[in-house]
Amino acid sequence: MTTNLKKVMISLPNNLLQEIDGFIKEDNQDRSQFISDAMEVYVNQLRSSKFRDEMKQGYLEMAKINLCIATECFMVENNTFFNYEARLAECD
C-alpha cells in the first residue's frame, strides 16, 4: 500500500456506515482501509466504463468511415461491371 496518504473528512449516511462497520468487523479491517479499497474499486470501474465508451465511439466512427469506403468501392465496381457488360453486348 502507498505510504503517501492524505487525511480527508467525508460524510456518510448512518445506515451505510453501520453496514461498513459490519464488514470491517468480519474482516478485521479499519474504516480507512475499507473505504480506500472501495474507492479504488469504484475508480477502476469508472475508468473501465470511460474506456468502453471511448472504444464504442471509436468503433462507431470507424463504421461510418468503412461505410463510405465500401460505398465508393461499390460504385467503382458497379461501373466496371456495367462497362464489362456493355462491351460483351457489343460483341454479340
Image (cartoon, rainbow, N blue to C red):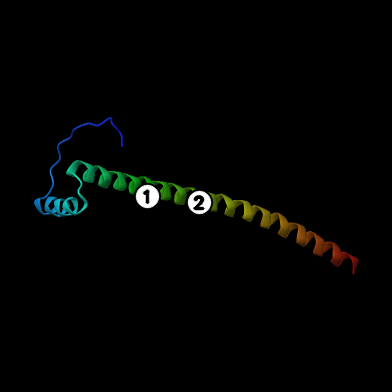
Q: Quadrant of residue 76?
A: bottom right
Q: Which residue is mark 2?
A: 59
Q: Amino acid at mark 1?
A: Ser
- The quarter of the picture where the C terminus appears is bottom right
Report the Cα–Cα distance between label 2 and label 1: 15 Å
Judge whether 15 appears above or below 4 on screen.
Answer: below
**Number of numbered callouts drawn:** 2
User: Image check: 51 left or right of 69?
Assistant: left
Instruction: Please tell me whether mark 1 sits on a helix, a strand or a loop.
Output: helix
- The quarter of the picture where the N terminus appears is top left
Judge whether 64 appears above or below 33 on screen.
Answer: below
User: Image check: 91 left or right of 59?
Assistant: right
Q: Amino acid at mark 2?
A: Tyr
Q: Quadrant of residue 78?
A: bottom right
Q: Residue furthest left?
A: 14
Q: Residue at x 18, y 33 (%)?
A: 7
Q: Residue at x 49, y 52 (%)?
A: 60
Within 10 Å of disc 2 (Cα), the crowding (few <14, some 14-19, many 20+) is: few
Q: Residue at x 67, y 57 (%)?
A: 74
Instruction: Please tell me whether mark 2 sits on a helix, a strand or a loop.
Output: helix
Q: Which residue is mark 1?
A: 49
